[in-house]
Image: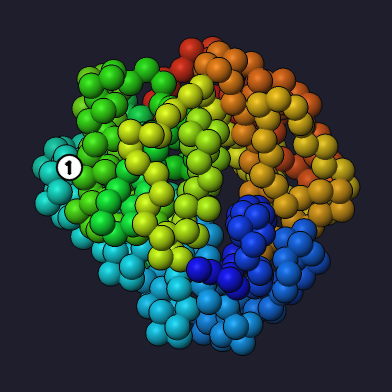
Amino acid sequence: MIRRLFIANRGEIALRVLRTAHRLGMTTILAVSEADRDSLPARLADETRPVASYLSIEALIDAAVAAGADAIHPGYGFLSENAAFARVASEAGIVFVGPEPATLAAMGDKLEARRIAQAAGLPVVPGREGGFPLLIKAVAGGGGKGMKRVDREEELDAAMAMAAAEAEAAFGDGRLYVERFIASGRHVEVQVLGDGTRAVHLGDRDCSIQRRFQKLVEEAPAPFIPDDKRAALRNAAVRLAEHLHYRGAGTVEFLVDAADFDFYFLEMNARIQVEHPVTEAVTGIDLVEQQLLIAGGEPLGVRQETIALEGHAIEARINAEDGRRDFRPSPGTVRRAAWPAGPGIRVDSHIADGGKVPPLYDSLIGKLIVSGSDRAEAVARLRSALDALEIEGVETTAGLHRAIAADPRFVQGGVDTRFFEGFGNA
């Protein structure tokens, strides 16, 4: 059993992990930078340990060892998929809440992940031989960094140079690979859980509404996928997880052709996802709890035949960004945070009145999650919840989300990744 849990992250995911860990009777120790010393997660943790950076493996492991932690939860982002972090934690006698280091290394290298997916029988996006347009991707990438679309041969060299520089700056690895760009594609992902022996899926999510390859809106299940294709997607994700002997929570991401619903493996995120609450809403399963139980040595506590998906859920990421200034980060003090509440509404946020949004980190300040008996009810609930949301002191993307929720294409459902083409200045 995990008794003392070290949380190597900040913001809403740190608070999310704290709450489940407390419910399970664990003592929580939170890593805090100087900027987060007075944050809500820091106030709610049983103990805090100062760290100079959430990206310093040495500092985090030293703090966890000094605190007597027997496990580390990395959250998402930062070092959550870093194989070296997981390995050093294990060498220090601390359980890493996530997959084995070898799995992290394999899935963190997009070319290796592609090779393994093919070996497990999953289809992959054709490479450069498919012709233009192309999509350049960083081998060690994520979050849209090091990713460039190229429409003509004469643009390729310059785009490759820009992508390599961006990838090197973001990941310390400038390696790239190229795939055919599928213009009318949907981003659909499948949530999996595994205990190293057995794996299950918890349904799918649609994350097609993206701005500059950054997800903004996610929903579960993905709307308007034919039943046979949906079953094939989910089965493919489980097949990959079992091929990897996967331990913990993970997400297998696919590109689905909006025309014929053929699908292609993109990558596997070997961690908890930002959008995990929509899956929790339709399954009733606490994914962080499952992570902690599996990391504590328990076998998978759910079986595929007992997992029931009911209703529909949508998540809107609320970022502190200024839409009038090309969505630049808007750090500062939140004078007032009036988050909506009511049936079918969940808010995951570390920001309340007086909360600080430091300029050093990701601009996500909260996630608004709504659910309903069907998609129409969820969309209506999203619109009313966004109307009730009030954040003062920093600029946010709430207005953008109100426009998305009112867009007839979104209301209908099943949009592809081109949603933002021609969508104002977004």
Residue 424: name its quadrant: top right
Label 1 environment density (alpha carbons within 10 Å; few <14, some 14–19, many ≥20): many
Residue 130 relative to residue 147: left or right:
left
Total marks placed: 1
Residue under the image location 64 percent in, 16 percent down: 380
Residue 308 relative to residue 154: left or right:
right
In the image, 114 versus 100, the foreground residue is: 100
Q: Is residue 55 visible?
A: yes
Residue 202: name its quadrant: top left
Q: Point out the image quarter for the C terminus.
A: top right
Residue 350 image offset from top left, x and y in percent: 72, 52
Residue under the image location 38 percent in, 34 percent down: 306
In the image, 165 versus 152, the foreground residue is: 165
Residue 180 relative to residue 383: left or right:
left
Q: Is residue 257 visible?
A: no
Residue with the mark numbered 1: 122
